[in-house]
Image: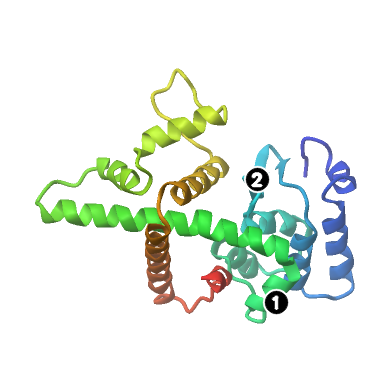
């Protein structure tokens, strides 16, 4: 595996403590889930580039994308997880059943747990809220017998943030040096999209009163619970992310 520097240089740098902890813990027989969460608690790098891919673990210096960090740390744990365990964690956020909320919080530590919650509410719930409001807008639109339109996404964003999605995208891209002046549209990488969503969460906290903020938060949580129920109707999954709701 190659990075901007060599993998060995990365181990000597900011990733050394967590990676050496993983190797020592696994060699001593400790289970992979506990080892992983302890390593997350030790991690200090906000981002890395590995094989040309940017891994941005900390958004705005305060929101931890723990699943992305888990994916990166699992590179050091080949052979200790089954394929099914790996896919459940990286793609669905499922930890072994013995990892409950309190164990999760204790192993990653209070600082990382607060950053995890920031990501949970600022990205995961915010995306669910956007979906819920878009569905409400589309429902009202259909009730008036109007044809469906992708412009309704703009209406949903205007309701939540007092600006259209395109205007917000351009502001975000320009402030982060991501805007191509020759293109009418802004296209974001996944890591940038998460940062954009978190910036919208921060904006919403700033422009609305506490009652409106609380109401929108409940709406987002209810939408996420609805999505989880639809998934669990197919498979009885337990989501570590649901612990903070």
Residue 233, given in percent of the width and then of the height, sits at: 39, 77
Task: Left or right? Give the position of 158 relative to 28.
Answer: left
Element under label 2? strand
Element under label 1? helix
Residue 11, given in percent of the width and then of the height, sits at: 86, 48
**Does the rendering let one see residue 214?**
yes
Image vertical order of residue 65 relative to residue 93, above or below = above
Find disc 2 in the rendering and name its residue.
Answer: 56
What is the crowding at mark 1: few (fewer than 14 residues within 10 Å), some, or many (at least 20)? few
Find disc 1 in the rendering and name its residue.
Answer: 103
Residue at 77 percent across and 35 percent down: it is: 4
Residue at 28 percent across and 56 percent down: it is: 135
Snapshot quadrant of residue 183: top left
Task: Left or right? Give the position of 199 relative to 17.
Answer: left
In space, the residues marked 1 and 2 are separated at their CA atoms by: 25 Å
Q: Of label 1 and label 2, which has the lower sequence position? A: 2
Image vertical order of residue 18 relative to residue 218, above or below = above
């Amino acid at each position: 595996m190659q990075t901007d520097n060599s993998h060995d240089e990365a181990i000597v740098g900011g990733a050394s403590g967590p990676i050496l902890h993983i190797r020592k813990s696994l060699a001593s027989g400790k289970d992979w889930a506990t080892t992983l969460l302890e390593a997350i608690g030790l991690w200090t790098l906000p981002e890395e580039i590995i094989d040309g891919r940017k891994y941005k673990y900390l958004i705005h210096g305060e929101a931890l994308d723990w699943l992305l960090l888990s994916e990166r740390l699992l590179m050091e744990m080949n052979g200790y997880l089954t394929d099914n365990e790996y896919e459940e964690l990286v793609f669905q956020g499922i930890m072994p059943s013995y990892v409950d909320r309190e164990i999760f919080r204790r192993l990653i530590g209070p600082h990382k747990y607060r950053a995890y919650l920031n990501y949970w509410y600022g990205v995961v719930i915010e995306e669910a809220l956007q979906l819920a409001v878009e569905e409400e807008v589309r429902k009202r639109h259909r009730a008036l017998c109007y044809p469906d339109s992708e412009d309704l996404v703009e209406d949903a964003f205007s309701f939540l943030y007092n600006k259209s999605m395109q205007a917000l995208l351009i502001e975000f891209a320009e402030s982060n040096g991501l805007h191509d002046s020759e293109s009418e549209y802004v296209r974001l990488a996944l890591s940038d999209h998460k940062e954009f969503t978190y910036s919208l969460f921060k904006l919403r906290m700033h422009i609305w009163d506490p009652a409106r903020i609380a109401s929108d938060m409940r709406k987002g949580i209810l939408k996420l619970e609805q999505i989880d129920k639809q998934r669990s109707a197919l498979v009885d999954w337990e989501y570590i992310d649901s612990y903070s709701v």
